[in-house]
Image (cartoon, rainbow, N blue to C red):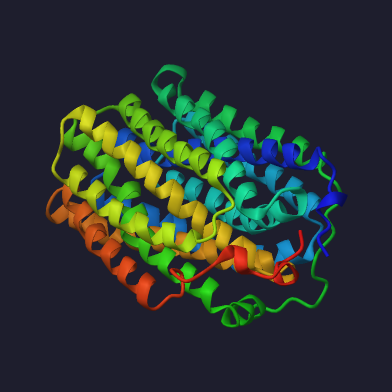
Amino acid sequence: MNSSHLVPKSAFPWYLTASSLWMAGMSLQGFLFTWLLVGVLELPADKTSFARILAEFPPLAVLLLGGMLGDRRDTRSYLIAMHLLMALPPLLIALVFKLGTLTYWWVVLFGILMASIQSLSDPARQAALSRVTRIDVQRSVTLMTIVTTLVGLAGFALGAQLENWGLALVLLVQAALFFVGSFAIARLPALPAPNTRPVKFSEGLAALKQMPLVRNVIGLNFLSSLFNAGAYIIAIPYIVKEVYQGDAGFFAMVMTVFTVGSVGSNIVLLLVMPLRNPGRLFLLMQLTRVAILILVWMQPSLWLFYFAMFAWGLNMGVTTTMVRSIVQELAPVETRSQILSILLLSFMVSSPISSLLLGYVILGFDPLAAMVPGMFMSLIIFGIGIWRSGLWQYDAQALDATTKPNP
């Protein structure tokens, strides 16, 4: 039985507010961590890649734990604690900077702490979406993506002011974003634990075994993240700095253009949802991505480079939303946080691996060469997706209402 009519009308707006503040803080974090390594410490690609690996592998150990805690704790209280905890690392780094002792290892520690707390928080935050919305999952995921990403642009805007405001002030603003978000979480209705059984690490994996379509979506998303999202994360900062001789403001503008493309794609999706065949759209986007990566690889003029970043953001916005909505729609409520933690794990594992692999590609050739592996991987994903995954045949509207997880 669907219980969406029992959800207060104010629940989703407050959820969007808290998630938007979180996204703004994390957008700023992505900018700060990358630019501190590339633009401030001026490290070569191999050392930057190693720093990303050091910062991103430890949080993998707590991601599945975050999924289990999300299924077994009152979600509102748990997320309040995560917001307050997330405000502490920026304050620590601001103090270190003011003392004049900021080094490579402090930046790495900053990345580890922020990514670890995010790993504990995100499964519960994403699983809560289905419990606070009064509309279908596809549109809920898309609407959340639009709102949080638009607010997340504030993070890039703050990053662009780094050289004007100074690092310490930007870090204080970042801490404030997470702190204020805790008050929005406190306005949510009570969200008691959906699962009170004893904690088992294998429960999420066991549930995933029984859902081959969800398993295949997560697997293909991992391959996509490995060389496509990875190319954006590790190669674009060096393309900005070495190919186009850009500064922090230019880098922030590139990230903004990419994000605007991502938001634009989700606005269009919202107008046509719910989609009957979301899997087909995910697969077709792999072909358009090949053309985008070729354009970036050709070192186009500045306006064409901006266009490519916009198109890349549009493409990634569609694929990410399709993956999240399919998994969110099919995952049962009792193990939803754990299954979403596995999806998030696929994102997080791919980032340090791609940073290592593409970092050596950049070091051995140039930043533009990091686009080439993604071209071939996109074609592979398209082929596997059509013939072996079941994604092309997936019909979301054909699912019987009684088999869909309740909010």
Residue 195 falls left or right of residue 313:
right
Please indicate, yes or no, whether residue 62 appears anywhere in the rendered image. Answer: no
Residue occupying the point 39% across, 59% down: 225
Question: In front here: 398 or 193?
Answer: 398
Residue at the top extreme? 164
Residue 321, x across and y down, in percent: 51, 52
Residue 235, x across and y down, in percent: 27, 47
Quadrant of the image containing the C terminus = bottom right
What is the total number of numbered labels drawn onto the structure image?
Answer: 0
From what the image shows, is residue 118 above or below residue 64?
above
Residue 325, x across and y down, in percent: 57, 57
From what the image shows, is residue 285 above or below residue 247?
below
Residue occupying the point 28% across, 42% down: 236
Residue 223 falls left or right of residue 343:
left
From what the image shows, is residue 236 above or below residue 254?
below
Residue 343, x across and y down, in percent: 53, 64
Question: In front here: 5 or 50?
Answer: 5
- Which image quadrant for residue 383? bottom left
Please indicate, yes or no, whether residue 166 appears anywhere in the rendered image. Answer: yes
Quadrant of the image containing the N terminus = bottom right
Question: In front here: 124 or 384?
Answer: 384
Residue occupying the point 63% across, 62% down: 329
- Which image quadrant for residue 61? bottom right
Residue 41 falls left or right of residue 201:
left
